[in-house]
Amino acid sequence: MKKIGFTVLALLAFFWLSSCSNKDDLVVFEENGVQLLISQEYLDKGISYDSYSSDMAQYPTFIISFAYTPALDRLYEQAEVMWDTIESQEAQDLYMEDFERSLVLHQKIIAIGITLPESDYRSLAPDDYLATLPVLVRKYGYVYLLKVMENSTDGMDDEEIEVFRDCQKYIEKSIRKIRIEEPVVKSGSGSGDNSLVFPQFESPTLDGTPVTNDIFSGKDITMIHIWGTFCTPCIEEMPSLAEWVKSLPKNVQVLGVVCDVGSLDDSSEKEAAEQIIKECGVEFPNVIASGGILTYLTAVQFVPTTIFVDSTGTIVGEAIVGARLEDYKKAVEKYVSAN
């Protein structure tokens, strides 16, 4: 079967087994400073949890999710049977789009939690996504954010709706008994660690030109800008970003990553990306989300997200989350002046 696109893979990433400890139903998210009760009974019903440490995300993040296994199993079984009957590439593309939409109906994010230093929280712009999340508590010099997501039950049958609502109510009840502790800052983690290297990759640009990590070696610093065709702030910022890139010094470059285009066969998203790039006057290369890039994107929480790498591919400085052109400029100027 054709490889599933980025959108579904990103959602499925939420359901990987967590590295967090689980003892007597107590799930411990150490870097978040959060302990939450989740019983084996509800894990068996479809609840799962995952965490992204500060090595993988701007701030430690945990996600509580739900997946209804019976419905997903049925979809995959049907897909295996149907796939052999579809002959044309166009029909395969249409089927995959419908298949991905069906998968999403049976997978839900119930809650998301993020912990960040009080000083960082105070510096957020009012329209920053993190600033819009509910504050659970301020303690130990940190702000603990926790949002219970609103989810639709469209596409679920009565049995699945009953199980999902039961799991959702259970998590909401568990959150009311949440335990807060001081976050555990792991040695060598966080934005100050410059030992992280961007994964090896070979991904085509939207016009099919292959790009590898070798692109980094020709410049002192590369700004990797991760965006999506569904992201309004990304699109609104793009004309100004494109104009600024034209004025960059020769030792600096920008590489765009279109996070919702997983292959050159993703016709609708690819066409949307090409249209945005054309209308906004973008001249810097934009690659699709495949290979090693896709591996990195499973840890990206929001778009746009912008990171910086040196000529060896080593990630430098802090990731910038949100459409923040002035901050991109400052980050580039800071690096260039220091080197």
Image: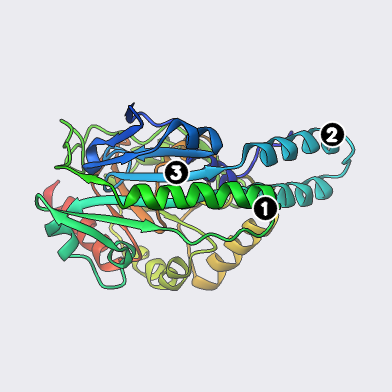
**Residues packed near mark 2 inside 10 Å, few (<14), some (14 to 19) or many (20 plus):** few
The correct choice, above or below, for 295 with respect to 23 in the image is below
Pointer 3: what residue? 297
Closer-to-camera residue (233/173): 173
Residue 208, image x and y in percent? 62, 46
The correct choice, above or below, for 220 with respect to 243 in the image is above
Q: Point out the frontmost of discs 3 and 1.
A: 1
Residue type at mark 3? Leu
Answer with mark 3 or mark 1, whichever residue precedes in sequence.
1
**Rounded to the nearest whole Å, what is the CA distance between mark 3 and mark 1?**
20 Å
* Residue 30 seen anywhere in this rendered image of the structure: yes
Answer with mark 3 or mark 2, whichever residue precedes in sequence.
2
Residue 233, image x and y in percent? 42, 69
Closer-to-camera residue (261/299): 299
**Rounded to the nearest whole Å, what is the CA distance between mark 3 and mark 2?**
31 Å
**Residues packed near mark 3 inside 10 Å, few (<14), some (14 to 19) or many (20 plus):** many
Identify the secondary structure beneath mark 3. Answer: helix
Pointer 2: what residue? 81
Report the residue at 73% width, 40% height from top: 75
Pointer 1: what residue? 101
Is there CB contact under 8 Å for labels 3 and 2?
no
Report the residue at 78% width, 38% height from top: 79
Q: In this view, does 33 lie to the left or right of 300?
A: left
